[in-house]
Every structure is written in structure tokens, then in C-alpha cells.
Amino acid sequence: MARRRDEKGRGLLHFFTIVGFTATVLGLVSAGMLSGAQGGAALIAMVLVVSLASRLGTSVTRVVLGVGLPLMAMALLVIREGKGNTQAMTALAGAILALLIALFGIFIIIRGRGR
């Protein structure tokens, strides 16, 4: 009985995760920062992340906060600073990717390869 209640609670958490993300994406679409197709793709990606995390038995919160939130923050940064211009957003995304690769390299150097 307790396990069933726990599963219902997780299902509700998953639902509200999707609701919150949907509100964010719809706000970006209505502000003109995302096209309808981009918004739809983002919503489908979020549903995939939540359903896969649920299926694998991992914490959706851990997956969303550890992976989804940083990726969403980068995407929002690129969209906001690129002002919806595809060329500007592509250039900015490339620059951020290069920075992240360099930072990851420094992390590997400091942490050590083999540990």
C-alpha cells in the first residue's frame, strides 16, 4: 500500500515538472523567443526526459536538476542574447560550447585522469 502511494506521489511530481516546463516554454513562444516548432520540440524532449527517468527508476528531480536545468539555462541564454536571430544564436552557441569544452579540459587536468 505504501509503495503504491509513493508511486502516485512520483507520478504527481512528474506531472508538475512537465507543467512547470510547459509554462516556461509557452511563455517563450508567446514572447516570440521560440517558434512554435522549437517550443514543441522542447516539450517533447522534456516529456522524454521525465518518462525515461521514471522508467529507469532514477529520480526525476536529479535528472532534471542535474542535466535538464543546466541545458535549459544555456538554451535560454542563447535564445535571449541571440534575440531570435538564427545566425546570432548559432554563433553564440558555438562560443559557449567552446568555452564549456575548455572548462571541462581544465577540470580533467585539475582532477587528474586516473584518480
Image: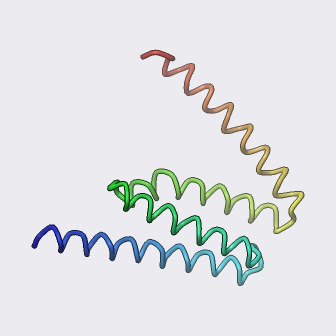
Residue at 78 percent of width and 43 percent of height: 95
| Relative image position of residue 46 (x, y in whole percent) | 54, 66
In screen coordinates, is 98 left or right of 90?
left
The image quarter containing residue 14 is: bottom left
What is the image's colouring? rainbow
Farthest-out residue, right: 87
Residue at 51 percent of width and 69 percent of height: 47
| Relative image position of residue 115 (x, y in whole percent) | 42, 17
The image quarter containing residue 13 is: bottom left
Farthest-out residue, left: 1
In screen coordinates, is 31 left or right of 52?
right
Residue at 33 percent of width and 73 percent of height: 11
In screen coordinates, is 76 left or right of 93?
left
User: Looking at the image, which is closer to me, 6 or 17?
Assistant: 6
Where, quadrant-wise, is the N terminus in this rendering? bottom left
Count of marks, rendered view? 0
User: Looking at the image, which is closer to me, 1 or 113?
Assistant: 1
Farthest-out residue, bottom: 30
Picture layout, residue 109 above or below residue 60? above
Residue at 81 percent of width and 58 percent of height: 89
